[in-house]
């Protein structure tokens, strides 16, 4: 199996030399291409493109475009994945089940599960699935060639992969890497949110995003939270409720029982909502109860998302999400999924319950020990907000 290695270099020439030497010793690649965003770089027996300016992650895809093989290995300039971890990726891609497979370190794998497009620690992609000229050209037509395109190119291109997987890998960092970090993690997460919010405006993504609102079946926004709506519509009384990620508005009538005033929010095309904007713009303590039914698994920065829900709510936050131990990240629109323990960890103190979202609204509260072991498909966290 012939594989090209496409590497991205910025201000780490010594790191890149170590990486190239190591990859050559693995004897897995028949060509190595380096896209150099920094100062002049000299390494024997590799193809180097000196960009002349820093176009960050977009350079990765310029290198991929020049690769002669169908399978392309990529990584950043601040780590050296083991030969075993790369061979594992090659085996996954050899089965022709995936368009893309990547390594994740433990800290990210635990939070993200199997659905995050981080390629800096090593990844292999099928070049034919990435229309690089088409995607980059369409982005530039709509938004121009800007810093967000450079920094978040991974999100732009990998958002279109239909099948992908992530594997847990031990990927040592190089000593020099921390000195020249491209960006702080929080800045990166916010920038990623901005890029993902732009995808729905690009021609090649229109069908994908409208399908989420209108398409029936497995990929569509079905009326699949009936049980949760009914239960909390009966439980909550005389309250203002903000339902975040409300989609086609199925929750409005059910949550409006018992003299509740319901406001619906979403950001995607086709949504039947009252607030068509990001939740970070909603004022503090502006609703008694904030609900998010099966939304958390679609959010990139889940921690900040939960912080916003808690900030907006005066009394209570209700979160539901599918159980990763049951569904195993099979929905390609999920950024990640959560096991019961992972949901409790990210939510913090609260009450937790299980339920079947298509029934009449019967759910069962469990203590934390029992909840951690449940194999029920639908999970719920109820977080009380202190005044």
Image (spheres, rainbow, N blue to C red):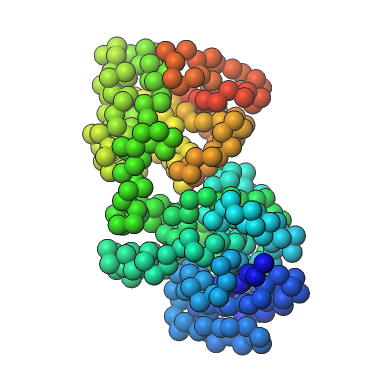
Given residues 81 and 68, the one toward you in this image is 68
Q: Quadrant of the N terminus?
A: bottom right
**How many dots with numbers?**
0
Rendering quarter of residue 83: bottom right
Task: Tell me residue 331's x, y (percent).
Answer: 49, 40
Q: Which residue ends up furthest to the left in the rendered image? A: 274
Rendering quarter of residue 160: bottom left
Task: Tell me residue 286's x, y (percent).
Answer: 30, 31
State left or right for residue 266 relative to residue 85.
left
Q: Quadrant of the C terminus?
A: top left
Picture layout, residue 324 above or below residue 163: above
State left or right for residue 90 relative to residue 201.
right
Question: Can see residue 363?
Answer: yes
Question: Can see residue 239?
Answer: no
State left or right for residue 318 relative to residue 138.
right
Instruction: Give the residue displayed 42% in from the left and 13% down from the top.
Output: 360
Instruction: Give the residue displayed 62% in from the left and 57% down from the top.
Output: 93
Picture layout, residue 190 above or below residue 1: above
Task: Tell me residue 268's x, y (percent).
Answer: 31, 43
Task: Tell me residue 195's x, y (percent).
Answer: 38, 56
Instruction: Give the residue displayed 71% in from the left and 70% down from the top.
Output: 28
Instruction: Give the residue displayed 46% in from the left and 47% down from the top.
Output: 300
Given residues 260 and 66, the one toward you in this image is 66
Picture layout, residue 387 above or below residue 34: above
């Amino acid at each position: 199996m012939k594989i090209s290695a496409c590497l991205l270099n910025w201000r780490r020439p010594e790191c890149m030399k170590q990486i190239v030497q190591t990859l050559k010793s693995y004897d897995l690649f028949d060509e190595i291409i380096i896209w150099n965003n920094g100062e002049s770089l000299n390494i024997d027996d590799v193809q180097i493109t000196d960009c002349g300016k820093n176009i960050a992650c977009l350079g990765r895809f310029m290198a991929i475009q020049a690769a002669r093989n169908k399978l392309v290995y990529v990584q950043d300039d601040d780590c050296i994945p083991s030969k075993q971890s790369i061979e594992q990726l090659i085996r996954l891609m050899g089965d022709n089940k995936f368009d893309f497979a990547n390594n994740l370190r433990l800290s990210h794998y635990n939070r993200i599960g199997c659905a995050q497009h981080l390629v800096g620690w090593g990844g292999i992609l099928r070049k034919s699935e990435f229309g690089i000229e088409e995607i980059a050209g369409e982005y530039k037509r709509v938004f121009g060639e800007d810093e967000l395109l450079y920094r978040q190119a991974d999100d732009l291109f990998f958002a279109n992969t239909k099948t992908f997987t992530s594997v847990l890998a031990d990927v040592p960092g190089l000593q020099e890497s921390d000195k020249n970090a491209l960006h702080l993690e929080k800045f990166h997460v916010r920038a990623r949110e901005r890029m993902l919010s732009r995808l729905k405006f690009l021609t090649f993504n229109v069908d994908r995003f409208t399908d989420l609102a209108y398409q029936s079946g497995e990929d569509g926004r079905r009326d699949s939270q009936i049980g949760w709506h009914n239960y909390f519509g009966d439980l909550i009384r005389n309250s203002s409720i903000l339902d975040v990620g409300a989609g086609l508005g199925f929750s409005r009538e059910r949550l409006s029982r018992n003299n509740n005033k319901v406001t619906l929010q979403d950001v995607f095309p086709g949504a039947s909502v009252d607030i068509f904007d990001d939740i970070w713009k909603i004022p503090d303590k502006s609703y008694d109860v904030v609900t998010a039914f099966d939304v958390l698994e679609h959010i990139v920065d889940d921690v900040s998302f939960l912080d916003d829900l808690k900030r907006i709510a005066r009394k209570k936050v209700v979160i539901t999400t599918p159980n990763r131990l049951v569904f195993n990240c099979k929905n390609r629109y999920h950024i990640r999924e959560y096991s019961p323990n992972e949901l409790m960890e990210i939510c913090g103190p609260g009450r937790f319950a299980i339920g079947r979202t298509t029934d009449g609204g019967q759910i069962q509260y469990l203590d934390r020990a029992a909840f951690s072991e449940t194999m029920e498909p639908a999970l719920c966290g109820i977080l009380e907000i202190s005044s």
